[in-house]
């Protein structure tokens, strides 16, 4: 009589084999995506460091800076959905490469602006060039990893934001301080030129190494491809009600998520573009020291992103893992304003805000991907990101305007804290059955 094989033995062996397969995919794809986003984010927000010098050199007001930094998001929003739909149709490899090449050139050209109008035009074009990159990668992740694995992968990808602060802050500070007047260019000009180089180089890395799909991955065997396809197909079968472009625009949940992300993005971008200024206002004056201090909040943010996303994946719970970090971000912004010129209190507040914003962003992006599939995922994720990124325009412009009017950023920090608290409670309006698994 043949003995029955213990069912848990087979399951355990299969699970181990599948985990090894996903580890292989992660090692192959994630480093390229991570480094590309790091370079992208550095090019997007290095204007926050350039501001420390360029405003005086070009005689720009805080309002001019805030409007110029924010106009980036106007171009970004206009071209976001079309860009992501194109990526879904033509493939990630060439489209992501196109995005990276165009933004590298435009970012470098910012070194030569003179008038506010030139600054506005280049920032608008930079936003248009980068449109589709983040939602495009988030869409690309849905081609490879199922929901139960995607949370941590998304967090690792989005960790490029805090890493850009950890690496880019000290680097930008050193460039500003060390490269001033070298070959007739100011430090802020060298900042734009030097930090555009990684994006330019990565254009060709993407073309060479990023496969458009599971089928195009030459480093996978036929059986490995079959396993990956089956897992994605099984998940896509649960999303049939939200599989077309039209269904994404008609879904109340997509619009609700868009408004929620608007609140979360306010916290993300006010820190991205104003963190060096906020640290300077707290009493740190030298560009190199400001750069080093900006690394501290981002170190905590990187840890928070990973722990929150890991917990969400293990528990299959998404809403509260987004709510709590969003509230922490709002609390941190309020504390940074309350601390004023007390560098200790200000840094605690900025660290809480940065960690909360980063963890909330990583957890949030598991929500739309949980119930959108196919073309709806391309359009829906882009729509959510587009509306959310309007917050980038509002936050940067509003902080600059209020800083000129009141000679303080405190009022805007308190205002954004209230919006983040509202966004946190709105997350609970998203049905748990749609996003928890």
Image (spheres, grey):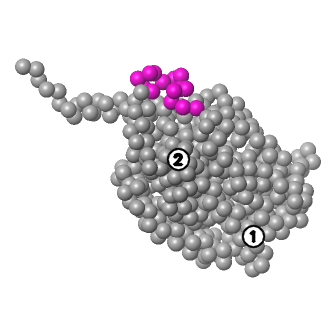
Q: Is residue 283 in view? A: no
**Residue count near mark 2 (Cα–Cα under 10 Å), binned few <14, some 14–19, many ≥20:** some
Identity of the residue drawn at 44% across and 55% down: 308
Residue 437 in picture, x, y percent from top left: 36, 51
Query: In the visual, does 229 lie left or right of 295?
Result: left
| Residue 302 on image: x %, y % | 53, 52
Span colored in magenta: 212-225
Q: Secondary structure at mark 2?
A: loop
Percent x, y for residue 350? 59, 65
| Residue sitting farthest toward the right | 184
- Disc 1 element: helix
* Main secondary structure type of the part rendered in magenta: loop
The answer to which quarter of the image holds residue 16 is top left
- Foreground residue, 95 or 165? 95
414 left or right of 192?
A: left
**Magenta-drawn stretch contains 216:** yes
Task: Please tell me which of labels 1 and 2 falls first in the chain.
Answer: 2
Point 50% across, 58% down: residue = 251
Question: Dot 1, how many residues are within 10 Å of its Cα: few (below 14), some (14-19), or many (20+)?
Answer: many
69 over 38 or under it: above or below: below
Residue position for label 2: 244
Q: Which residue is mark 1?
A: 400
How far apart are the alpha carbons under marks 1 and 2? 40 Å
Residue depicted at x 55% and y 69%: 420
């Amino acid at each position: 009589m043949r003995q029955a094989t213990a069912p848990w033995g087979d399951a355990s062996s299969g699970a181990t084999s599948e985990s090894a397969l996903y580890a292989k995919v992660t090692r192959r794809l994630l480093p390229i995506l991570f480094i590309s986003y790091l370079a992208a984010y550095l090019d997007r927000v290095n204007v926050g460091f350039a501001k420390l010098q360029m405003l005086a050199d070009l005689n720009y007001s805080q309002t001019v800076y805030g409007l110029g930094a924010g106009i980036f998001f106007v171009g970004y929003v206009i071209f976001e959905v079309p860009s992501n739909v194109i990526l879904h149709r033509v493939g990630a490899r060439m489209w992501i490469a196109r995005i990276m090449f165009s933004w590298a050139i435009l970012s470098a050209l910012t070194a030569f602006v003179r008038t506010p109008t030139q600054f506005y035009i280049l920032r608008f074009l930079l936003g248009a060039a980068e449109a589709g990159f983040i939602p495009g990668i988030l869409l690309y992740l849905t081609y490879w990893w199922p929901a139960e694995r995607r949370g941590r992968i998304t967090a690792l990808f989005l960790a490029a934001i805090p890493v850009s602060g950890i690496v880019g802050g000290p680097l930008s500070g050193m460039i500003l301080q060390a490269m001033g007047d070298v070959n007739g260019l100011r430090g802020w000009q060298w900042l734009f030129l030097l930090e555009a180089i990684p994006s330019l180089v990565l254009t060709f890395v993407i073309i060479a190494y990023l496969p458009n799909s599971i089928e195009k991955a030459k480093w996978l065997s036929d059986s490995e491809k079959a396993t990956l396809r089956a897992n994605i197909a099984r998940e896509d079968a649960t999303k049939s009600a939200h599989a077309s472009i039209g269904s994404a625009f008609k879904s109340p949940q997509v619009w609700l998520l868009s408004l929620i992300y608007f609140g979360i993005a306010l916290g993300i971008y006010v820190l991205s573009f104003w963190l060096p200024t906020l640290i300077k206002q707290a009493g740190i004056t030298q560009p190199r020291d400001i750069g080093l201090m900006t690394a501290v909040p981002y170190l905590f943010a990187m840890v928070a992103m990973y722990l929150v996303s890991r917990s969400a994946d293990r528990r299959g719970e998404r809403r509260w893992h987004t709510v709590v970090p969003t509230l922490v971000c709002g609390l941190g912004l309020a504390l940074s304003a309350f601390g004023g010129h007390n560098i200790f209190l200000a840094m605690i507040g900025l660290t809480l805000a940065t960690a909360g914003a980063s963890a909330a962003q990583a957890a949030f992006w598991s929500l739309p991907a949980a119930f959108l599939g196919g073309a709806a995922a391309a359009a829906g994720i882009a729509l959510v990101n587009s509306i959310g990124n309007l917050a980038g325009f509002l936050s940067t412009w509003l902080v600059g305007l209020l800083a000129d009017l009141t000679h303080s950023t405190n009022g805007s920090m308190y205002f954004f804290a209230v919006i983040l608290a509202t966004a946190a409670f709105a997350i609970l309006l998203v049905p748990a059955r749609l996003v928890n698994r």
